[in-house]
Amino acid sequence: MLLLGFVLMAVSLVTRSSRTRPTLDFRYTLWLWPYLIGMAVISFLGQYGGGTGLIPLWIDIAIVIVFSFIIFAWAVISARPTEQVRASVEGDPGMEVTELSASLAEA
């Protein structure tokens, strides 16, 4: 499913005109790759779904909880600023940070 999402995003970027294409800044999603890889490793080492069983029951749950909280905190800290999200939703996806700062200073 993840691969399908990437394909759909690529098709969307290719078929949109450059004027309406949103700018992509992947630094706001850097937390996603360690999360996916970490969960895969924890699942592989865990008890369920053909895992190796190296991590005992209940310990695996504790590891997932701690790992998820760490990744969640990272995701919240590195989230896209609210003003940029609002500008994208309101139809100005190309609005740069400097334009946002200027418009906020005027308000």
Image (cartoon, grey):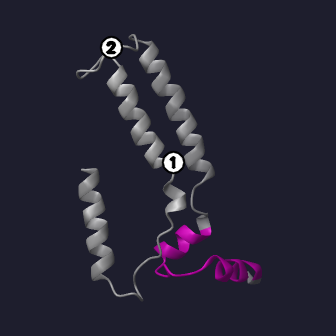
**Quadrant assignment, res 22:** bottom left
- What residue is shown at x 60% (from left), y 54% (from top)? 78
Q: CA distance from mark 2 to mark 1?
A: 27 Å
Q: Is residue 31 magenta?
A: no
Q: Nearer the viewer, residue 41 or 9?
A: 41
**Of marks 2 and 1, the one in the foreground:** 2
Element carrying mark 1: loop
Q: Nearer the viewer, residue 83 or 19?
A: 19
- What residue is shown at x 43% (from left), y 12% (from top)? 58
Stretch in magenta? 83-105
Which x, y percent locates residue 54?
37, 13
Task: Please identify the dominant SS of the magenta region.
Answer: helix
Which x, y percent locates residue 51?
28, 20
- What residue is shown at x 51% (from left), y 53% (from top)? 30
**Quadrant assignment, res 10:** bottom left
- What residue is shown at x 36% (from left), y 33% (from top)? 40
Q: Nearer the viewer, residue 104 or 65?
A: 65
Q: Which residue is mark 1?
A: 31
